[in-house]
Structures are given as structure tokens and as C-alpha cells.
């Protein structure tokens, strides 16, 4: 009997694991004609019986079914291996594991025994990291100097670096010049954890901790317009995720369809449930108005940032 397509991505570089998964799912889902053709299983609770049931289910309206189990804990990976003994040609199965698997892994062996593909995504270091950053920088249409600056200023976290490249590409697309000063102001990858702390306290409305963090950033010499830019990006992401939440999409589906790192999307998904679409749109308009008034010289950037924070 013919076997369906099986792909396993695993390894200690979660960004590359998730990137491979997104590309594979996008390719497979292009030919689906209904929502019935795709099923994502909870990695924390999936069992052999549940996975086997999903694998063997016959397509309803679609030419085949796509089954995904993403972010399967390494310690549970071998438990589901027996479910791969029979994968019909009408099923496409994607599995991901954030972590290293041993050479004797039953899951890896089961995937390969079924004719599937098991790819390890290792952490990039040294020349490999430099090459990846240079290639990614080119894909975003950015000058080589941007990649060099990221290598110098950012910590070697691919998810953060990719997010920074996306931000810089958007900044450049807005007609802004990416000179050395702009790069040093905009590249905040080394302080990304602090930015997460700030955005965690922005929705549904800024609390006392948000005010404290903003003032701390300003006292350290952070550019207020750069802070506002990052806040706007966060609100825009929460707004997009909220729209998907309203359509009934689950977290795993949203993570699969967005470029942002799954952890970032998860944080936005949680925030989206606490705020209305109208408030998010009003916050984005306030930040856009702030940017225009600063650039036109109507308001002081620092005082204006505190004023716009009160409007979010």
C-alpha cells in the first residue's frame, strides 16, 4: 500500500524547526478546499490512538488530509512512534520537536521506516550564523551593512534577528534611510526581553509597570520614536491575532500562518482576548498621530510619548 508524505523537523534551533514546519504546511494546504482537510493535534495530550485515528481518517472534500503535531515534547516523542506504522497515501503528516533527539530515537526511526523525511535543525554558530544572517538580509532586500550590524549588536537568537530584519525592512519601505545612527537606534535585539516586558503591560491598557519601563528606557537614552514604533508593531500584531481569534482560529493555526516566532504569537494571542478591536485601532491611530506630530515638529518626542501612552 502506498504511504502518505511524512515530515519530521526536530532540533535545538526552534526558529528553523518552525520555519520548516510553516513552509511545509503552506505547501500542503494550498491544495485543500475546506477546513476539514487540516487537523492540528495538541502535542501535550496526543496519544497513539488519537494520532492513529487522525492519520487514518478518510478525506471528506479534499484530495488528502493534513495532520500536524507541532512542538511535541522530546520526552513524549517516542510514545507516538507506533502510530506511524500505517499512513495512507491520502494523509500528509507533519511532526515537530523542539529539542535534540538521540540517534536511536524511535520516532526518527519510525518516520524513516515509513519513507518519510526526518531533518535535524541545529543551532547556528560562527560562520554558519554569519552566512544565515547575510542570506536573510538579502531576502529582505536590505543592504549587507544591516546584517553586519545585527551580527555585532544582536544576541545570536534567530527568531529575534529575523524579527529585527522584518522591522528594518518595514522601516526602509516607509522611505526612511537605514544609516548607522538609525540602525543603532532601531536594533534592539539585545534588549528584546525588556521589550517583551513592556508590551506585556500595554494591553488591555498601560499599567504602572508600563509607565516605569518607558521612563527607564528614556532615562537610558532610548529614542522615544523607536519605543513608539515597537509599541505600534505590537498593537498591530495583537489586532491581527484578534481578528483570527474572532474567526475561531486556534493558537496552533495562528502560529502556523504568521512569520513571528510562536512564543511572540502566543503572547499576542493571550493579550487579544483581553482587549477590543476598537481599542487596538484607536491605539494605533494615536501612535501614528504621535509620529506625524514629532516629524512635523509640533510636539516634543519625549513628552509626546508619555502623552500618547495615556491614550492607549
Image: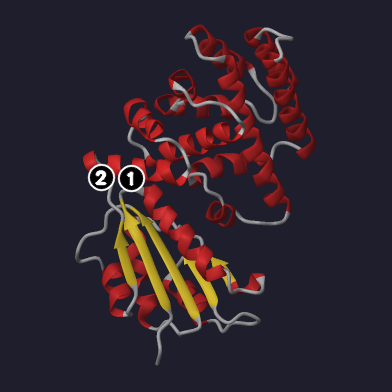
C-beta proximity under 8 Å, tags 1 and 2: yes
Residue 284 in the image, given as x and y percentages of width and height: 71, 30
Name the secondary structure under disc 2: helix
Q: CA distance from mark 1 to mark 2?
A: 6 Å
| Residue at the far left in the pictured view | 103
Residue 79 is marked as none
Task: Pick the quarter of the image with the C terminus.
Answer: top right
- Residue at image point 64% right, 26% down: 202
- Residue at image point 52% right, 44% down: 260
Name the secondary structure under disc 1: helix
Crowding near the residue tagged with mark 1, few <14, some 14–19, many ≥20 C-alpha atoms within 10 Å: some
- Residue at image point 31% right, 63% down: 119
Q: Is residue 6 above or below residue 294?
A: below
Place residue 281 in its image quadrant.
top right
Residue under numbered circle 1: 132
Place residue 109 in its image quadrant.
bottom left
| Residue at the far bottom in the pictured view | 1
Residue 178 in the image, given as x and y percentages of width and height: 49, 26
Task: Pick the quarter of the image with the N terminus.
Answer: bottom left
Q: Is residue 99 above or below residue 58?
A: above
Q: Is residue 259 above or below residue 189?
A: below
Place residue 120 in its image quadrant.
bottom left
Residue 87 in the image, given as x and y percentages of width and height: 42, 81
Residue under numbered circle 2: 128
Name the image colouring.
Answer: secondary structure
Residue 43 falls left or right of residue 9 = right
Amino acid at each position: 500500500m502506498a504511504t502518505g508524505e511524512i515530515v519530521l523537523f526536530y532540533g535545538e534551533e526552534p526558529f528553523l524547526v518552525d520555519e520548516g514546519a510553516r513552509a511545509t504546511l503552506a505547501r500542503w494546504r494550498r491544495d485543500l478546499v475546506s477546513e476539514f482537510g487540516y487537523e492540528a493535534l495538541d502535542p501535550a495530550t496526543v496519544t497513539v490512538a488519537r494520532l492513529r485515528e487522525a492519520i487514518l481518517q478518510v478525506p471528506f472534500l479534499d484530495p488528502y488530509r493534513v495532520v500536524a503535531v507541532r512542538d511535541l515534547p522530546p520526552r513524549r516523542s517516542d510514545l507516538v512512534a507506533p502510530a506511524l506504522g500505517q499512513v495512507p497515501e491520502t494523509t500528509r503528516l507533519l511532526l515537530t520537536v523542539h529539542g535534540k533527539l538521540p540517534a536511536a530515537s524511535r520516532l526518527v526511526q519510525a518516520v524513516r521506516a515509513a519513507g518519510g523525511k526526518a531533518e535535524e535543525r541545529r543551532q547556528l554558530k560562527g560562520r554558519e550564523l554569519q552566512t544565515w544572517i547575510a542570506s536573510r538580509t538579502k531576502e529582505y532586500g536590505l543592504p549587507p551593512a544591516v546584517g553586519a550590524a545585527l551580527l555585532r549588536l544582536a544576541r545570536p537568537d534567530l527568531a529575534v534577528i529575523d524579527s529585527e530584519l522584518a522591522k528594518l525592512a518595514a522601516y526602509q519601505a516607509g522611505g526612511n534611510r537605514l544609516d548607522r545612527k538609525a540602525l543603532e537606534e532601531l536594533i534592539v535585539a539585545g534588549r528584546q526581553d525588556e521589550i517583551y516586558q513592556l508590551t506585556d503591560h500595554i494591553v488591555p491598557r498601560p499599567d504602572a509597570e508600563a509607565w516605569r519601563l518607558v521612563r527607564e528606557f528614556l532615562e537610558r537614552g532610548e529614542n522615544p520614536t523607536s519605543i513608539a514604533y515597537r509599541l505600534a508593531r505590537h498593537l498591530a500584531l495583537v489586532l491581527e491575532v484578534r481578528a483570527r481569534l474572532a474567526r475561531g482560529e486556534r493558537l496552533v493555526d495562528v502560529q502556523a500562518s504568521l512569520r513571528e516566532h510562536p512564543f511572540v504569537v502566543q503572547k499576542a494571542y493571550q493579550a487579544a482576548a483581553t482587549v477590543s478591536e476598537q481599542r487596538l485601532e484607536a491605539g494605533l491611530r494615536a501612535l501614528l498621530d504621535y509620529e506625524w506630530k514629532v516629524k512635523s515638529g509640533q510636539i516634543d518626542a519625549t513628552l509626546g510619548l508619555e502623552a500618547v501612552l495615556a491614550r492607549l
